[in-house]
Image (tube, rainbow, N blue to C red):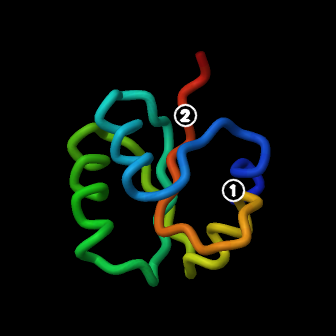
């Protein structure tokens, strides 16, 4: 499933993912298990309320690497196809 992150349009990070979910433009959200619950809690609730599927990744480092960035990422939202 992480292979999708390299080739898909996405929003990386909590703030960007929240914006995409709030605008109803996300199809799937990935959240790192080691990210602080205080940071990811609002995104999880919003995804649940909007019936957006959440996939969990073990670490922020793995999630960042899957996106092709050198730093960890706490969340990534895959964008809906235009």
Picture quarter containing residue 38?
bottom left
Q: Residues within 10 Å of mark 2 (few under 14, many from 20)?
A: some
Query: Residue at 59% of width from left, 74% of height from top?
Result: 72
**Lateral position of residue 1 relative to residue 54, left or right:** right
What is the x, y in percent for residue 75? 48, 61
Numbered marks: total: 2
**Lateral position of residue 51 relative to residue 10, left or right:** left
What is the x, y in percent for residue 66? 72, 63
What is the x, y in percent for residue 73? 55, 67
**Where is 44 relative to 33, above or below?**
above
Query: Residue at 22% of width from left, 58% of height from top?
Result: 42
Picture quarter containing residue 54?
bottom left
Residue of label 2: 79
**Lateral position of residue 27 relative to residue 61, left or right:** left
What is the distance, in whole Å, between disc 1 and disc 2 at their CAs?
15 Å
Task: Check disc 1 and report its element: helix, strand or loop.
Answer: loop
Task: Check disc 2 and report its element: helix, strand or loop.
Answer: strand
Picture quarter containing residue 23?
top left
Query: Residue at 31% of width from left, 40% of height from top?
Result: 51
Q: Which mark is residue 36?
A: none
Q: Residues within 10 Å of mark 1 (few under 14, many from 20)?
A: few
The answer to whether the residue labelled 1 contacts the one labelled 2, judged by CB atoms less than 8 Å apart, is no
Query: Residue at 50% of width from left, 44% of height from top?
Result: 28
Q: Nearer the viewer, mark 1 or mark 2?
A: 2
On-image quarter of the N terminus: bottom right
Residue of label 1: 1
What is the x, y in percent for residue 16? 43, 46
């Amino acid at each position: 499933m992480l292979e999708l992150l390299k080739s898909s349009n996405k929003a990386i990070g909590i703030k960007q993912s929240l914006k995409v979910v709030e605008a109803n433009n996300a199809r799937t959200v990935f959240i790192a298990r080691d990210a602080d619950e205080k940071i990811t809690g609002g995104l999880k609730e919003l995804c649940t309320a909007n019936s957006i599927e959440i996939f969990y990744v073990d670490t922020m480092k793995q999630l960042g690497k899957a996106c092709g960035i050198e730093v960890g990422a706490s969340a990534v939202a895959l964008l809906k196809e235009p």
